[in-house]
């Protein structure tokens, strides 16, 4: 197997995909949205509990998908707690740039370190949508929409 | 399930010679030898096809049926010659062959021009659960617009379709049976002749989706007695951008036009229009002229090798691949129909089809991973997606071995 594939499927990614964090429906969620990738049929549902200060108090996800989409969703839920809506949007912008191979400058040092494991996706253009599915669903939930599609 | 009857030795077949006819097969991907096993999605192109299109554009190109000048005449001759060639390929008459832009458009044409005018709320369309979306969605349109009812015929766990089950689904309200001649996921070849016989005994016409079957078997629309037969050029080693609809002459003559524009009319005035006869009636606008020339060259190529010889070679590959995959207890083959075509879908325990396809790709092995535009079938078998290896006239047993080796690589990553 080549180095790029090894980087894509590094141990942390495989671990997240096998043992996703924050998995399942969220009691007390006040926002939720489903993401659907028509290309492969993968589905992910994001649950958010957003408090009155527009801060994400809790977040979970459920669904089925490939290792990349599940790991990405799991990693995302790990990172969102406590962030305000504008902070989340900024983080998402940085994440999208990262997986599309457009650099990581707009991520904070901590976020950069945590998301570094996803950078390998940029070498696999056909898989970028797998990595972004959960993020688009999360954004749809924040925006009060019910569904998101990977364009 | 594992026991298969002894197979006859494949006919003498020069696969190395055939491979040399396809320039792309010599290339490497990611520094690895290319093993192209996504032929059910689209087949690669021979020198003969590439050369015929190139030569036509260099020397004989013009628009068809319009000018009286030299090049218009040569182009018209080549285009109509291609129609004759396609007709011969499926044992039809040339005026029963309509060129479309794809197999999908051919089916949409039947939906729009043949069925829509004669279907009303509550009328039924019978189809199998293993149809490709292109033989589902046009009928859903008639459900949405006209209130048609879709009646689904199930397949067995092995993926076989019993013609008697199709007959049972036909009622006095059935207006069409729309059925695949070969599943693009399971490889199942349906008993189309028997399905047509049973449907006709109840006066119901049959449309067959032949996009896969036309590649892997010899099609005789007269013998099948099928009303409509749709297939595409690019899976048959021809170019993209051309599809074929065979329709019985009486049906085509009775049908409304599809698209409107040049070429499909007899006379246009401010107050009225009259339509051209088939097949021109259904070919509005400048048709896929270069593609038709390429498709004719592809059919010449296929017949030059011999369709029986190709089928025998592909059957050997399928048998070999099924045997190799059955050895792996973490692989589940989906589609075990007897006499199936060279399409092998499978699930790998603990590995999503997309992750599998990515790892295989980096090993040089191109397979399709996903729902294969057959979500109804995926639901029937309780899977979200499968990986699919599909073989063509140029594949080899070595390539099956490369697939199996790549599966082991993926297994190491994920399990």
Image (cartoon, rainbow, N blue to C red):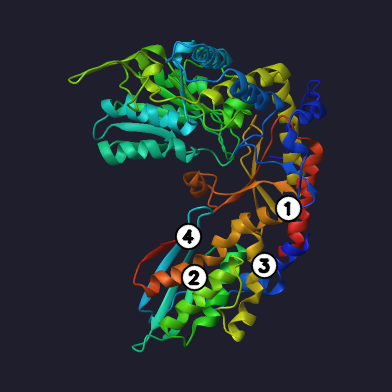
Q: Secondary structure at mark 1?
A: loop
Describe residue A99's horizontal placement relative to residue B131 as left or right: right
- Tell me the CA gap for discs 2 and 1: 36 Å
- Tell me the CA gap for discs 1 and 3: 31 Å
Q: Subunit of mark 2?
A: A
Q: Nearer the viewer, mark 2 or mark 1?
A: 2
Q: Subunit of mark 4?
A: A
- Tell me the CA gap for discs 2 and 3: 17 Å
Is B209 above or below relative to B145? above
User: Residue at left 36%, top 66%?
Assistant: A146
Q: Which residue is mark 1?
A: B329
Q: Is residue A52 visible?
A: yes
Measured from the top left, where is residue B325 in percent x and y? 74, 45
User: Residue at left 29%, top 29%?
Assistant: B116
Q: Earlier in the sequence, mark 2 or mark 3?
A: 3
Describe residue A103's horizontal placement relative to residue A136 as left or right: right
Q: Subunit of mark 3?
A: A
Q: Which residue is mark 2?
A: A135
Q: Is residue B415 visible?
A: no
Q: Check if mark 3 and mark 4 are on a common chain.
A: yes
Q: Check if mark 2 and mark 4 are on a common chain.
A: yes
Q: Which residue is mark 4?
A: A150
Q: Which residue is mark 3?
A: A120
Q: Nearer the viewer, residue B234 or B314?
A: B234
Q: Secondary structure at mark 2?
A: helix
Q: Secondary structure at mark 3?
A: helix
| Crowd band around label 4 with a 10 angstrom C-alpha radius: few (<14), some (14–19), many (20+) | some
């Amino acid at each position: 197997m080549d180095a790029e594939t090894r980087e894509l499927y590094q141990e942390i990614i495989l671990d997240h995909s096998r043992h996703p964090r924050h998995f399942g429906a969220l009691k007390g969620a006040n926002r939720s949205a489903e993401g659907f990738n028509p290309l492969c049929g993968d589905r992910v549902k994001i649950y958010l509990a957003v408090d009155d200060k527009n801060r994400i108090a809790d977040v979970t996800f459920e669904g089925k998908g490939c290792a990349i989409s599940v790991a990405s969703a799991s990693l995302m839920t790990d990172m969102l707690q406590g962030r305000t809506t504008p902070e989340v949007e900024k983080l998402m912008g940085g994440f999208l740039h990262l997986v599309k191979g457009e650099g990581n400058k707009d991520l904070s040092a901590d976020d950069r370190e945590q998301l570094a494991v996803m950078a390998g996706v940029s070498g696999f253009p056909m898989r970028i949508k797998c990595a972004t599915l959960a993020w688009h669903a999360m954004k749809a939930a924040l925006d009060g929409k019910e569904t998101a599609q990977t364009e | 399930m594992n026991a298969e009857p002894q197979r006859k030795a494949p006919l003498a077949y020069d696969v190395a010679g055939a491979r040399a006819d396809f320039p792309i097969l010599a290339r490497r991907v990611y520094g690895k030898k290319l093993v192209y096993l996504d032929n059910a999605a689209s087949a690669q192109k021979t020198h003969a096809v590439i050369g015929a299109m190139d030569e036509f554009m260099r020397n004989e190109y013009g628009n068809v049926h319009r000018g009286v000048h030299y090049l218009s005449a040569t182009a018209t001759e080549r285009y109509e010659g291609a129609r004759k060639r396609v007709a011969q390929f499926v044992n039809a008459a040339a005026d029963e062959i309509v060129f479309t832009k794809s197999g999908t458009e051919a089916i949409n044409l039947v939906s729009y021009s043949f069925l829509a005018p004669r279907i009303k709320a509550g009328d039924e369309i019978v189809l199998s659960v293993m149809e490709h979306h292109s033989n589902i969605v046009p009928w859903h349109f008639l459900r949405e617009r006209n209130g048609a009812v879709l009646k689904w015929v199930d397949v067995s766990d092995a993926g076989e379709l019993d013609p008697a089950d199709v007959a049972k689904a036909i009622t006095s309200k059935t207006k069409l049976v729309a059925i695949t001649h070969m599943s693009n996921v399971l490889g199942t070849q349906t008993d189309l002749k028997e399905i047509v016989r049973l449907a006709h005994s109840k006066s119901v016409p049959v449309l067959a989706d032949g996009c896969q079957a036309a590649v892997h078997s010899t099609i005789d629309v007269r013998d099948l007695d099928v009303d409509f037969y749709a297939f595409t050029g690019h899976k048959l080693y021809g170019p993209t951008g051309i599809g074929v609809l065979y329709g019985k002459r009486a049906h085509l003559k009775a049908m409304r036009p599809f698209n409107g524009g040049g070429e499909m009319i007899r006379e246009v005035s401010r107050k009225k229009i009259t339509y051209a006869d088939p097949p021109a009636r259904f070919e509005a606008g400048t048709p896929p002229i270069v593609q038709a020339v390429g498709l004719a060259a592809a059919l010449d190529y296929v017949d030059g090798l011999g369709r029986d010889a190709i089928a025998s070679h592909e059957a050997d590959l399928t048998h070999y691949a099924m045997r190799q995959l059955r050895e792996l207890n973490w692989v589940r083959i989906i589609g075990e129909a007897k006499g199936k075509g060279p399409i092998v879908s499978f699930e790998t325990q603990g590995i999503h089809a997309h992750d599998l396809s990515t790892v295989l790709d980096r090993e040089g092995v191109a397979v399709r991973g996903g729902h294969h535009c057959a979500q109804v079938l995926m639901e029937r078998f309780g899977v979200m997606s499968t990986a699919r290896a599909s073989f063509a006239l140029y594949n080899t047993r070595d390539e099956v071995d490369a697939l199996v080796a790549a599966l082991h690589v993926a297994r190491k990553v994920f399990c």
